[in-house]
Amino acid sequence: MFDRLMKSLFGAQPEELPAEDARVALTALLVRIAKSDGHYDDAEQDQIRQIVAERYELTPELAQDLMYHAAELEAQAPDTFRFTEAIKNAVPYEDRNSVVAAAWRVVMADGDRADEEDALMRLIAKFLGVSDRDSHLARQRAAG
């Protein structure tokens, strides 16, 4: 599965992702955001686990398994542009907007909004084709 997903996402011609692969790719993007400030703490991991459990109606064990595979993908994924471009091509706008909203929840999870996270969020929203306005509104919702 992992080799197929890497080829689908990062081959010369990115392919449309099956639902299961899209889950892994979107979760890997959340992991990348959580790691962007050099800290991948329990609060961020718990937030990602909660997001994917809710989003995909998973048990805690299945959410943890998804995070494991996502962390593998994130570690091997090339630059963020190609990563988000593949997701953009595979996921409708409404879902990409919800990915940005989930990403803001991860950024806010540890109570510290680092400059690296802000910079990456601006890039990710742009690369996913989510408007600045929609990203800003998602950030406000995530902040409470």
Image (spheres, rainbow, N blue to C red):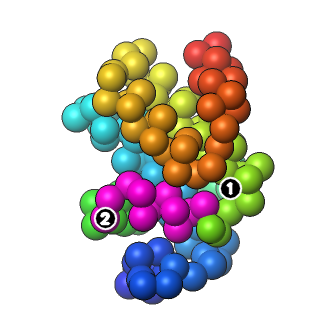
In what element is the residue under mark 2? Answer: loop
Res. 67 visible in picture: no
Res. 33 visible in picture: yes
Above or below for 21 versus 138: below
| Secondary structure character of the magenta stretch overall | helix
Amino acid type, mark 2? Pro
Q: Nearer the viewer, residue 99 or 61?
A: 99
Q: Residue 130: where, in percent of width, then height? A: 65, 43
Locate residue 37: give its quadrant: top left
Q: Residue furthest left?
A: 38
Whether residue 79 appears in magenta in the rendering, the answer is yes
Which numbered disc covers residue 75? none
Q: Badge 2 local density, few (<14 within 10 Å), some, or many (20+)? A: few
Locate residue 12: give its quadrant: bottom left
| Magenta span of residues | 78-88
Residue lying at 37% horizontally and 47% vertically, measured from the top left: 32
Residue lying at 48% horizontally and 23% vertically, measured from the top left: 108
Q: Which residue is identified by label 1?
A: 56
Q: Does label 2 or label 1 sit earlier along the sequence?
A: 1
76 relative to 131 in the view: left or right: left
Q: Residue 76: where, in percent of width, then height? A: 28, 67
Front label number (2 vs 1): 2
Locate residue 116: give its quadrant: top left
Residue lying at 41% horizontally and 27% vertically, measured from the top left: 118
Q: Which residue is identified by label 2?
A: 78
Whether residue 86 appears in magenta in the rendering, the answer is yes
Above or below for 121 versus 72: above
